[in-house]
Image (tube, rainbow, N blue to C red):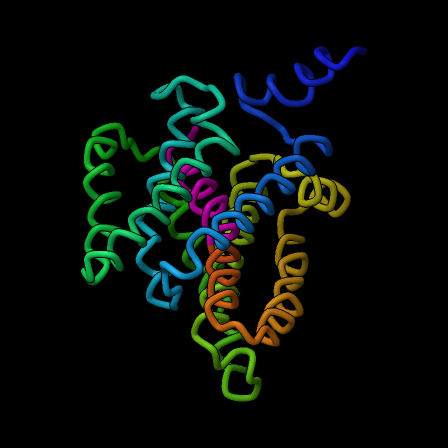
Amino acid sequence: MNITEFFQEYFIKGWSRPESYNIFDTISYAGLAVILVYLSYLLLKKKINFTFKTALQIIPFIVLGSIVRVFADSGVYPRFFWTVTPGVWIIFFVTALACLYLDQRFKTRGEITVITPLLLLIPHLFYINIVNGSAIIYFTFFYLLSLAPFFLLRSKFALLKNNFNMLAIASHLFDATSSFVNVDFFNYVEIHVLGGFFAGVFDTGFVMYPLKLIILPILYLIDKEKDNNLKNYLKLVICVLGLGPGIRNLITVILGV
C-alpha cells in the first residue's frame, strides 16, 4: 500500500461515507486539535477574556455544528471534509472564536456569539423529523442520574465547587449518556476507537461513564495553572469536546439517522 492508497483508505473514505474512526485518523485529528487549540490561544489570549459565561455563549454554535454533522450523514448536506469531522468542527470553532472576539471588540454582551448560530439554526429546523422520541426520555433519565452523584458531592470537594469544572463534567456525561442510550437501547455502534473497543469488550455503552472519569484528574491538573485565562480556555475546549459528539449522538438517534 503506497501513501496515496493509505490516505484514501484511512482518511478520505471516512469523509465520503458514514465512518467508523480508525487509529490513524483518530491520532491525526487529535494532533490537529492540539495544534488548533494552541495556535488559536496564542492569537487570541490578549484579545478575548475566556470565562464561564463564554462557554455558555458558544453552546448554540456546538448545537449548530452537531446538526450540520448529522445532516451530512442523513443526506441533507453532501459529505465531504468540511461537513464531517474534523472539518465541520474547525469551521464552527474558528467562527465561534471570531464572534467572541467581535463581542469583546465592540463591547457587546455576547449577542454576536449567541445570535449568529441561532439565526443559522432556523432553516435547519424545517428538516427536523423526530423518529425516536423515546430517546429523549431515556437520555433525560440517565443523564440526570449520572449528574446526581457530582451534585451530591459538590460541597465536599473543591474541584466540584467550581462552576466551570461542573460544566466540563456535565458536558462529558452528556456524551457518555448519549453513547450509552444509542448503543444499548437503539442498536447503534460506538464509532470512536477507544469507546468502541471497550463497548465491544463489555457489550454495553455504559462503559463510557467510567471512561469519562479521566476528566477529573485532567481538571485537577488544569486548576493548578496560574494563568486564569489559559485555564478557562482549556476548560472551554474540554466542554466542546464533550458536548460536540454528545449532541451529535443525541440528534442522530432522535432523527433516526
* Image spot of residue 185 (x, y percent): 53, 43
Residue located 49% across and 54% down the image: 41
Residue located 52% across and 59% down the image: 173
- Could you tell whether 253 is left or right of 183 in the image? left
**Extreme residue in the bottom direction:** 156
Foreground residue, 172 or 224? 224
* Image spot of residue 45 (x, y percent): 44, 60
* Image spot of residue 180 (x, y percent): 57, 49
The number of numbered discs placed on residues in the rendered structure image is 0
Does residue 47 sit above or below 182 in this rendering? below
Does residue 257 sit above or below 205 in this rendering? above
- Could you tell whether 110 is left or right of 166 in the image? left
Residue located 20% across and 31% down the image: 123
Looking at the figure, which quarter contains the C terminus?
top left
Per the picture, the main secondary structure of the magenta-coloured stretch is helix
Magenta segment: 240-257
Foreground residue, 105 or 178? 105
Looking at the figure, which quarter contains the N terminus?
top right
Q: Is residue 256 magenta?
A: yes
Q: Is residue 42 magenta?
A: no
Residue 226 lies in what quarter of the image?
A: bottom right
